[in-house]
Amino acid sequence: MRMKWLIPMLWGLLTCAFMQAQEVQLQHPWKGKRVALLGDSISDPGGPRYWGHQLYFSYLEDWLQLEVYDYAVSGKEWDDIPRQVGLLEKEHGTDVDAILILMGTNDYNMGVPTGEWYTETIESVLAGSDMREPATMQFRKRRTLVMDNATMKGRINIALKLIKEKYPRCPVVLMTPLRRGWFQIDEGNVQPEETYQNRAGEYLDAYVDAVKEAGNVWSVNVIDLHAVSNMDPLHGQDFYYQGGNDLLHPGAEGSRHLASVLYYQLLPIVVKDL
């Protein structure tokens, strides 16, 4: 007899708990944060004047109530990041919760060699591997970060060293360059699609890989937009771009789509909360 009323009661409790769980809404961890945005024309705050539509970060401002400090400038390469960081520090000090960087497509276009992360030397160092015997001076290879504005990896090293020193508690998020098609703004500024090597004899992939590798070199977050954006102007998705002679910059639909991708890609990234 007891089971007749026990089962319905348990069922009712489970149903109530399920309905309450359905009503729980998780808050995006980036909501209301102060975010510095560094980069090139894809993020340039003057973009809406050129193209007449919102850029991706404007949607993120609305959806997440972000306070965005945007220092991106059209045409700039990785060697401009220190200047942008200087402006950020001058105007906002350390009152920043996260730093986003979307950069690299112009380094590719201008033929900046990707270069190397390190140089190696042989040096003497005190080392020991046995607790029962004293350590000794030993010759070992040692690698040192390349700090050279002549290569993209050297530029990234310079920029991230600066950011780490000035904003040690601020998470950094690097974004790889988007896929790119044909771009021509006038008779001089003509940029072939990514199927062509640049003047340094490298494909866009090498610059994408450099940004991804920087995540391990510098222990920073990387969002691989080249892979996860689902924006490929060379294979039927040119509608995400400006169109015509500009298959480099996202159009209105592409900007909103890119913002949607970043909304979810940012979810697992821990952001400064103090």
Image (tube, rainbow, N blue to C red):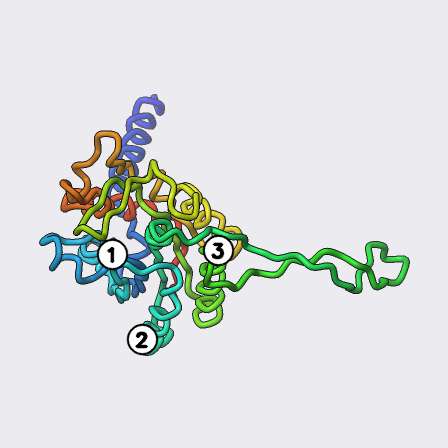
What residue lies at 16% left-to-right and 37% top-to-bottom? 239
- How far is disc 1 from disc 3 in space, using C-alphas? 21 Å
35 shown above or below 102: below
Disc 1 residue type (three-letter): Ser
Secondary structure of residue under mark 2:
helix
Mark 2 touching mark 1, by CB under 8 A?
no
Q: Residues within 10 Å of mark 1 (few under 14, many from 20)?
A: some
Disc 3 residue type (three-letter): Lys
- How far is disc 3 from disc 2 in space, using C-alphas? 28 Å
Please say whether residue 42 is visible from this viewpoint: yes
Disc 2 residue type (three-letter): His
Q: Which residue is mark 1?
A: 41
User: Of circles 2 and 1, which is in front?
Assistant: 1
What residue lies at 39% left-to-right and 59% top-to-bottom? 78
- How far is disc 2 from disc 1 in space, using C-alphas? 22 Å
Q: Earlier in the sequence, mark 1 or mark 3?
A: 1
Q: Residues within 10 Å of mark 2 (few under 14, many from 20)?
A: few
198 shown above or below 157: above
Q: Residues within 10 Å of mark 3 (few under 14, many from 20)?
A: many
Q: Earlier in the sequence, mark 2 or mark 1?
A: 1
Query: Which of the 4 image quarters holds residue 49?
Result: bottom left
What residue lies at 26% left-to-right and 64% top-to-bottom? 70
Side of 112 relative to 20 (left or right): right
Side of 94 relative to 19 (left or right): right
Secondary structure of residue under mark 3:
helix
Q: Which residue is mark 3?
A: 153
Residue 151 percent location from the top left of the image: 47, 57
Q: Which residue is mark 2?
A: 92
